[in-house]
Amino acid sequence: PHIPVITVDGPTASGKGTLASEVARRLGYHYLDSGALYRITGLAATRAGLALDVAHEHTIARMAEGLPILFLDGRVILDGQDVTDAIRTEEAGMNASRVSALPAVRTALVALQQGFRKLPGLVADGRDMGTVIFPDAPLKVYLTASAAQRAERRHKQLISKGISATLPALRADLEARDARDSNRSVAPLKPAEDALLLDNSQQTVEESVAQVLQWWEQKQ
Ligand code: C5P
């Protein structure tokens, strides 16, 4: 059967997760946060004491393939331990970016990601959802916002969680992460040729959600 999928790709802190999960909720579809899988892999490898580089590419890929993970009521459980907050730190994001540049790790996570495509449908967010994982998706969104806006949003998010952070450091971090994600040889961050571009710098969440739902209706 043909199972519908909407992909939402874009740079760090562009609001992909907020947009994609809300669109999924409105449509009653499943939701895949693919970045979480790289974050979990980075965390598991770090906890195993591995340097996150090519020397350990295949060991980390094998870990990624057999990740003992569970998604339970919005919590992420790794090997019986709640890692929901641990995978959301800036450091975890940077580590995710490191393991995600290893081709064998990306390959190891393909089947797991494609397995989220179940009826009645899926909304998937990440960097390569439209280009690599779901190339046949009928609607591909590429979400962007200025670096200044993205740093500001991330800053607010962290402060609201009681985590201290400075704006310039956050902006430098996210620009470094975007550079690595865009320049890697495998599945670099870039819009699919048939992606629709959405710049949400001047939009509320509701406006972006409405735009995507309207595009989706036009596809039916
Ligand atoms: O989206 P999020 O910030 O959680 O992703 C963390 C990191 O995982 C990204 O910086 C990127 O390097 C990597 N990633 C990826 N492909 C995806 C999703 C995330 O390479 N589909």
Image (cartoon, rainbow, N blue to C red):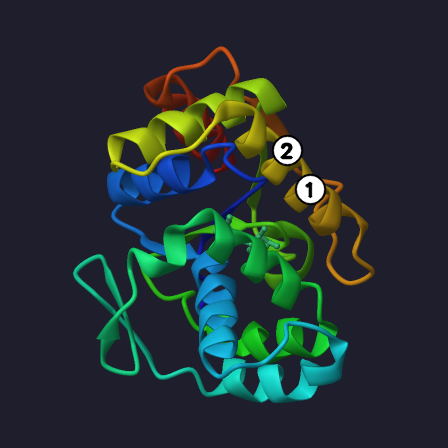
Q: Position of residue 81 (x, y in %)?
A: 24, 75
Quarter of the displayed picture in which ligand 1 can be seen: bottom right
| Rendered-image quadrant of the C terminus | top left
Q: Position of residue 73 (x, y in %)?
A: 16, 60
Q: Quadrant of residue 208?
A: top left
Q: Amino acid at mark 2?
A: Ala
> Residue at left 53%, top 33%?
170
Judge left or right: residue 191 versus residue 121. right
Relative height, residue 73 to residue 19 (above, below): below
Residue 139 in sight: yes
Disc assigned to residue 176? 1
> Residue at left 52%, top 19%?
149
Disc assigned to residue 7? none
* Residue identifier under label 2: 172
Look at the numbered disc 2 and give the secondary structure of its residue. helix
Relative height, residue 7 to residue 37 (above, below): above
Judged from this view, the residue extending furthest toward the top is 202
Look at the numbered disc 1 and give the secondary structure of its residue. helix
Relative height, residue 78 to residue 58 (above, below): above
Q: Amino acid at mark 1?
A: Ala
Q: Distance from label 2 to label 1 (Cα)?
A: 6 Å
Classify mark 2: residues with Cα within 10 Å, few (<14), some (14-19) or many (20+): few
CB of residue at label 2: within 8 Å of ligand 1? no
Residues at circles 2 and 1 in contact by the CB criterion of under 8 Å? yes
Q: Quadrant of residue 108?
A: bottom right
Q: Position of residue 186 (x, y in %)?
A: 77, 63
> Residue at left 56%, top 47%?
138
Relative height, residue 7 to residue 155 (above, below): below
Q: Position of residue 166 (x, y in %)?
A: 47, 27
Judge left or right: residue 93 versus residue 55. left
Residue 114 in sight: no
| Rendered-image quadrant of the N terminus | bottom left
